[in-house]
Amino acid sequence: MKITIKNMNCPANILFVRMELERLSIPYKSLEMGSAELYYVPAQTIRKELSKALSTYGLKIVYNDRSIIIQDIKSAIFHYEDNTDIEKRIDLPSYVAEAVNYPFPELNKIFLNETGSSIEKYFQSKKIERAIILLMRYNLTLNEISIQLNYNNVEEFIQNFRIITGMMPDRYKQLRNKQNIFAKRIGQKAVLQ
C-alpha cells in the first residue's frame, strides 16, 4: 500500500518517517521523498498514531486508497451510533472528521462518490436499521425508541423512519408481522406435505 507524505521536502524528513515507522513496527518496502510503500494497511489506531507522530515534524499522511477512508468513516459512524453519550456532546461531522483525521467536506465528497450516499444519510439509515430492530423485537413505544436513538422528539423519528422506509413505523410493523405469519403458514404447509 502506497501512502503520500505531504511537506516531505528534505532528507531529514526521510529519517523522521523511518524512525516513526520502526517505532510503530510498521514494515515498509520503500521510503522516498514524499511517499512510502507499506507491506500492508495498518490498523486505524496505528495509522492515527503515525499521523499524529509525523505531524510533530510538520508532515501529513495522505492514504491513497479510498476504501480505507470509507472503512474508517463507517467505523467512526458505528462508534458514534453505538455511544449515545457521544452523540449528545458532539455533532456527527465533527466526530467523523476528528476520528478519520481529515476535513469533513472532503470525507463527505469521497463517501458520496464511493457509496452514492452522504455521510449524514448513511448515518440516518443506520439509525433506522437500529429502530427497526427495536420496533420488531422489543415492545417499545415510538417515543421510547426515539429517546433511545437520540432523536429530538418522536415526530422527528417518525419523519426519518418514513423517509428511509417509505412508511410509518406502525404500518411497517403491521406489514412485517403479516409477512412473518404468512411465512410461518407456508412453512407449516410445506412440512405437512
Image: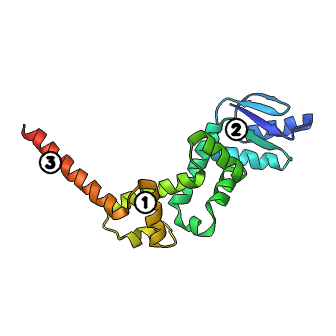
- Residue 56 placement, left or right of 107: right
Residue appearing at x 12%, y 45% in the figure: 188
Distance from label 1 to label 2 (Cα)?
A: 49 Å
- Residue 120 placement, left or right of 176: right
Residue most toward the left? Answer: 192
Q: Which mark is residue 185?
A: 3
* Residue at mark 1: 162
Image quarter of the C terminus: top left
* Residue at mark 2: 25
Residue 177, how many percent across, how many down?
Answer: 25, 56
Distance from label 1 to label 3 (Cα)?
A: 29 Å
Residue appearing at x 48%, y 73% in the figure: 153
Residue appearing at x 65%, y 38% in the figure: 66
Amino acid at dot 3? Arg
Evaluate if marks 1 and 2 touch, with contact meaning CB atoms under 8 Å apart. Answer: no
In this rendering, which labeled residue sits more in front, label 1 or label 2? 1
Amino acid at dot 2? Ser
What SS does tag 1 mark? helix
Quarter of the image for residue 85 reads bottom right
Image quarter of the N terminus: top right
